[in-house]
Image (tube, rainbow, N blue to C red):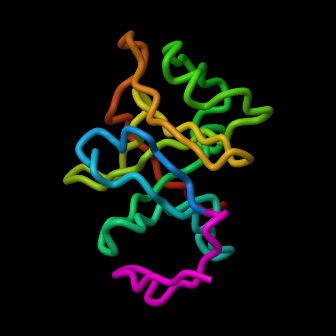
Amino acid sequence: MAEIVTTQFGRIEYDERAVIHFPCGLPGFENRTRFLLIERPTTRPLVFLQSIDSSNLCLVTAPVNAIDPQYHLAMTPEDQQTISQAQEPLCLFILSEGEKGWTANMLAPVVINKEAGIAVQAVRADSLYSHQHPLTEARPCS
């Protein structure tokens, strides 16, 4: 087992087979190519992408269907080739917290072939979606 000490989660032991590789990195983090998917029951549906290359880099994400069940994924032929023939790719929006609250990057979701352990950030060629789609907070029933 390999091990990393992270800023967000402390010491994490992991199997190298669990590592997700981004061959080209992520825009803005091109040199960070290896990540772990971390899911915690207490923070569902959030999924954390913890960098193995940088212990303080952890991206907060959520499954596309949890935010927009009608979302239409569009990938370039190059991204499709990188992902290969994933039977059911995992698609995640990267979330960000700003002055006006949380937003989802719907313009460029992360698409993961979990079986192959490979992923891309699929930047759309159109402007159908925003990179700062506002999220609304869930309100408890009264």
Residue 12 at what x, y percent from top left?
53, 84
Q: Residue at x 43, y 88 (%)?
A: 10
Residue 87 is covered by the magenta coloring: no
Residue sitting at the far right: 87
Residue sitting at the far left: 99
Seen in the picture, residue 11 relative to 29 is either above or below; the reply is below
Residue 28 at what x, y percent from top left?
23, 44
Q: Residue at x 67, y 31 (%)?
A: 69
Count of marks overlaid on the render: 0
Residue sitting at the far top: 126
Seen in the picture, residue 83 relative to 97 is either above or below; the reply is above
Name the foreground residue: 1 vs 80: 1
Residue 77 visible from this viewpoint: yes
Relative to residue 92, is residue 116 drawn left or right? Answer: right
Which quadrant, please, contains the N terminus? bottom right
Residue 30 at what x, y percent from top left?
28, 45
Residue 138 at what x, y percent from top left?
55, 55
In the rendered image, which quarter is residue 37 located in? Answer: bottom right
Q: Residue at x 28, y 51 (%)?
A: 31
Seen in the picture, residue 38 relative to 66 is either above or below; the reply is below
Which quadrant, please, contains the C terminus? bottom right
Q: Residue at x 32, y 36 (%)?
A: 132
Residue 142 visible from this viewpoint: no
Residue 4 is covered by the magenta coloring: yes
In the rendered image, which quarter is residue 58 located in? Answer: bottom left
Relative to residue 54, is residue 94 drawn left or right? Answer: right
In the rendered image, which quarter is residue 56 located in? Answer: bottom left
Residue bounds of the magenta highlight:
1-18
Name the foreground residue: 47 vs 26: 26
